[in-house]
Each structure stands twice: as structure tokens, then as C-alpha cells.
Image (cartoon, helix red, strand yellow):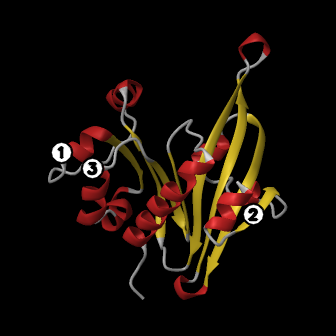
């Protein structure tokens, strides 16, 4: 990962020395499991965009006894004043999402984007989420499948559930994260 960071002109840290986990506590991803650890942090502060970008590996443990399992995940994170997001969660819709929706779990759908609405579960304060999910964002996620995204105020995280990217895949993941940031960034 160190070589990947150098190739991208970014900084690298092996361990979380700045308490990133504490900053992530409101995101659903970081409420799961125990034994939480962030490693392999690649970071880049861009003054021109007033943004702090990071990619890191996140590990947590679920279960117990003989059914303990470690989950490894790569996460794109951005903190920027150009974001002004409601607390929102976007995740791929699956069988259990549909069952939960049947029993009253929230899923914000868009009539004009039926494919998006079928592919993803979207949750949050509905009027605020509808306001921020512009057509170009809905179109993007209609084409791009399997992503999970969480937003809150000036923070955004992007990941594919249970997916850890190899060093060779990090540059593409970083570019995808930048693209998603630009979709949500307020014109200033």
C-alpha cells in the first residue's frame, strides 16, 4: 500500500494514529461487530477542493465462539465543507432488504428511476434525502451497481460490502470515490 500511496502522490500510514474510528461512529458500517481496526491509510488533503480524502482498510469481527468471523473492507472517506449531506444510507437491495421493507423498513424510491429503486435501498430523512439525490446521482448509481454509501454533514464514505481492494485496485477505487464526491459536492 505504501507504494500505491507514493504512486498516487499521497501520504501513507500503517495504523490509525488520528482516531478515525471515533470520527466514524455515526456510520452504520462502523456500528457493526467488535475488535474494530483501521489500517493502511492513504490520505490526500486537497486545498483547492477544501477536502480531506482517505482510503483505508477496516476490519471488524462478528459472531462468537466457533462462528467468529473477521470482515475486511476497504473504505473511501472524504471530509469536505463542499458536502452538506443529511444522514443517509445507500446500499444494494437484496432479499432481506425487501423482506424488511415489507415489514415497514424504510426504502426511498424514485418513480423516474425504477432501475435505481430496484437495485438500491435508500434510507434517511426522506425530504432531505430526496433533495440531495439529484438526477445525475441517481443515474450514476443506476449504472454503477453494488456500492454502499453513507453520508452525514461534511462526511461521506463509499465502499462495497465485505470487499477489500488489492493495492492494484486502489487507484481505480480512489478515482471512483472522487467521482462520487464530485456528484455530491455543492457548487461553491
**Residue on which the image places disc 3:** 143
Q: Nearer the viewer, residue 144 or 88?
A: 144
The CA distance from mark 3 to mark 2 is: 32 Å
Mark 2 Cα-neighbour bin, 10 Å: few <14, some 14–19, many ≥20: many
The CA distance from mark 2 to mark 1 is: 41 Å
Q: Position of residue 128 (x, y in %)?
A: 38, 64
Of circles 3 and 2, the one toward us is: 2
Q: Secondary structure at mark 1?
A: helix
Q: Image quarter for residue 162?
A: top right
**Residue on which the image places disc 1:** 114
Q: Is residue 123 above or below residue 52?
A: above
Q: Secondary structure at mark 2?
A: strand
Q: Position of residue 35 (x, y in %)?
A: 80, 36
| Residue placed furthest toward the right | 17
Mark 1 Cα-neighbour bin, 10 Å: few <14, some 14–19, many ≥20: few
Q: Is residue 24 above or below residue 78?
A: above
Residue shown at 41%/57% (left/top)?
125
Residue shown at 73%/31% (left/top)?
61
Q: Image quarter for residue 140?
A: bottom left
**Residue on which the image places disc 2:** 12
Give yes or no for contact between labels 3 and 1 (Cβ–Cβ under 8 Å).
Answer: no
Amino acid at each position: 500500500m505504501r507504494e500505491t500511496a507514493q504512486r498516487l502522490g499521497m501520504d501513507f500510514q500503517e495504523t490509525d494514529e488520528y482516531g478515525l474510528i471515533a470520527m466514524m461512529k455515526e456510520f452504520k458500517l462502523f456500528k457493526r461487530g467488535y475488535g474494530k481496526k483501521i489500517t493502511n491509510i492513504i490520505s490526500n488533503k486537497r486545498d483547492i477542493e477544501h477536502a480531506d480524502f482517505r482510503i483505508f482498510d477496516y476490519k471488524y469481527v462478528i459472531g462468537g465462539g466457533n462462528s467468529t468471523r473477521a470482515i475486511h473492507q476497504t473504505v473511501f472517506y472524504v471530509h469536505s465543507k463542499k458536502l452538506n449531506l443529511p444522514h443517509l444510507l445507500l446500499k444494494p437491495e437484496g432479499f432481506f432488504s425487501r423482506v424488511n421493507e415489507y415489514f415497514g423498513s424504510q426504502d426511498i424510491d424514485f418513480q423516474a428511476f425504477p432501475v435505481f429503486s430496484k437495485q438500491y435501498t435508500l434510507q434517511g430523512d426522506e425530504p432531505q434525502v430526496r433533495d440531495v439525490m439529484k438526477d445525475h446521482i441517481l443515474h450514476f448509481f443506476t449504472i454503477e451497481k453494488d456500492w454502499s454509501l453513507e453520508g452525514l454533514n461534511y462526511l461521506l464514505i463509499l465502499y462495497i460490502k465485505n470487499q477489500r481492494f488489492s493495492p492494484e485496485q486502489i487507484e481505480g477505487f480512489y478515482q471512483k470515490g472522487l467521482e462520487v464526491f464530485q456528484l455530491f459536492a455543492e457548487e461553491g
